[in-house]
Amino acid sequence: MKTNWSTVLTKIDADIIRTERHLAELHAARESLLPLMNDAGKKAGSSAKLPRVAKSVAKKSTSKAGRAQSTAAKLPATGSEFWLSVLGKSKRTGREIVDLAMAELKLGDEDRNAIYSRAANWFNGAVKKSLVQIVEQRDGVNVYQRV
């Protein structure tokens, strides 16, 4: 069985992005618990238990549905037509495509990971459907072109 290393690298990159996003959500959940811990400590000394609200805060901030809604609400739709128009007729790397997409959508750097993840997912599917092909690799990075 032949291994497509570029697909493996893309999946690893997507996993890294997901992990970074999850870590950021855990930091946010932790920060939201600190005031509750301080309030509970002041009321009953250092052995005070956290209120039950803390569990629901942590669960709510890390739920997949909450992440999907918040990301989807912030970012505009990016379907096949969008990615094909960004790619154009030129050969482009994933980074070049994401940079063009960010400029076209007028997004800030805080949205780069989400757009990169969308691009990686779409281009993996587009290669499988033969909408786009990998024409070369530059320093281990795929270069895409429309078929």
Image (cartoon, rainbow, N blue to C red):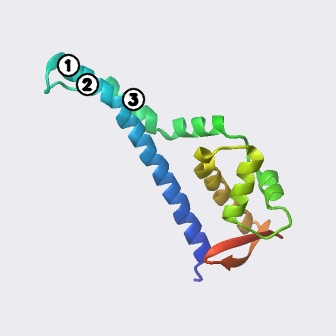
Towards the viewer: 24 or 2? 24
**Image coords of residue 36 (percent x, y):** 30, 24
How packed mark 1 is, by other alpha carbons closer than 10 Å (few <14, some 14-19, many 20 or more), is few
Identify which residue is drawn at 37% across, 34% down: 31
Q: Secondary structure at mark 2?
A: helix
Q: Position of residue 10 (x, y in %)?
A: 59, 66
Write down the quadrant of residue 85 in the picture: bottom right
Q: Residues within 10 Å of mark 3 (few under 14, many from 20)?
A: some
Residue 9 visible? The answer is yes
SS for tag 1? helix
Marker disc for residue 38 = 2
Alpha-carbon span between mark 2 and mark 3: 16 Å
Q: Amino acid at mark 2?
A: Asn
55 relative to 77 in the view: left or right: left
- Measuring 39% from the left and 41% from the top, which residue is drawn there? 27
Mark 1 near mark 2, Cβ–Cβ under 8 Å?
A: yes
Residue under pointer 1: 42
- 2 or 3: tag closer to the N-terminus: 2
Left-right relation of 67 to 133: left
Q: Residue furthest top?
A: 43
**Foreground: disc 2 or disc 3:** 2
Q: Quadrant of the N terminus?
A: bottom right
Q: Is residue 102 above or below residue 137?
A: above
Q: Residue at x 45, y 35 (%)?
A: 61
Q: Position of residue 78 (x, y in %)?
A: 74, 48
Residue 137 relative to residue 8: left or right? right
Q: Which mark is residue 23?
A: none
Residue 57: image tag:
3
